[in-house]
Amino acid sequence: MSLTHRDLADLVAALYDAPASMPWLYLSNPDANVYMGLIRKGDYLIVTARGSFSFTDWWHDVVAPPIDPAGQPAIKRVHAGFYSGTPEAWDIINWHLNPLDKAVFCGHSLGAARAILLA
């Protein structure tokens, strides 16, 4: 099974418009720090993250002091608002990730920054 950029864009768009219309393996609470959905397509585990949508999301965009995440030597200085909530999101992703999965991370705006950190 192949995935197209359009497939991934449609999944991210569903987080904004009609999340209940997708057969999500996992869909976080809309008020979660990292609002994301996980879905399986063939041997892919696709992680989608929504971008700025609420005042809290935009606040995370503005709160911009760089931080060095503790216990994450692979991640150097990062925007604090982008990093916020990603350790908890990773725990959820890791729980659903199988050894043979091909993981795909995608998102829009703030969600794209978080998708990069999660990947």
Image (tube, grey):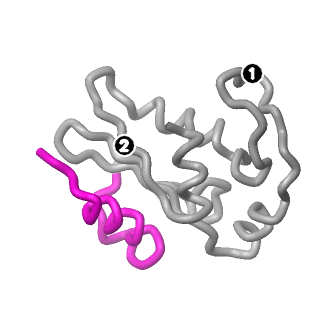
Question: At 60% from the left edge and 52% from the top edge, which residue is drawn?
Answer: 113
Q: Position of residue 79 (x, y in %)?
A: 77, 48
- Residue kind at label 2, given as amino acid type: Val
Q: Position of residue 32 (x, y in %)?
A: 64, 57
The local crowd at label 1, few if under 14, some if 14 to 19, many if 20 or more residues have their Cα within 10 Å, is few
Answer with the quarter of the image where residue 31 lies. bottom right
Q: Position of residue 43 (x, y in %)?
A: 20, 36
Question: Which of the two discs, 1 and 2, labels the residue nearer the N terminus?
Answer: 1
Considering only vertical position in the picture, is 118 above or below 49? above
* Disc assigned to residue 104: 2
* Disc assigned to residue 2: none
Horizontal side, residue 4 vs residue 111: left or right: left
Horizontal side, residue 48 vs residue 56: left or right: left
Question: At 63% from the left edge and 69% from the top edge, which residue is drawn?
Answer: 52
Question: At 41% from the left edge and 64% from the top edge, which residue is drawn?
Answer: 12
Q: Nearer the viewer, residue 62 or 13?
A: 62
Horizontal side, residue 59 vs residue 106: left or right: right
* Disc assigned to residue 71: 1
Assign the magenta stretch its main secondary structure. helix
Q: Which residues are magenta?
A: 1-24
Question: At 38% from the left edge and 70% from the top edge, which residue is drawn?
Answer: 14
Q: CA distance from mark 1 to mark 2?
A: 24 Å
Horizontal side, residue 103 vs residue 59: left or right: left
Residue lying farthest to the bottom in this orientation: 17
| Residue 76 belongs to the span the image colors magenta | no
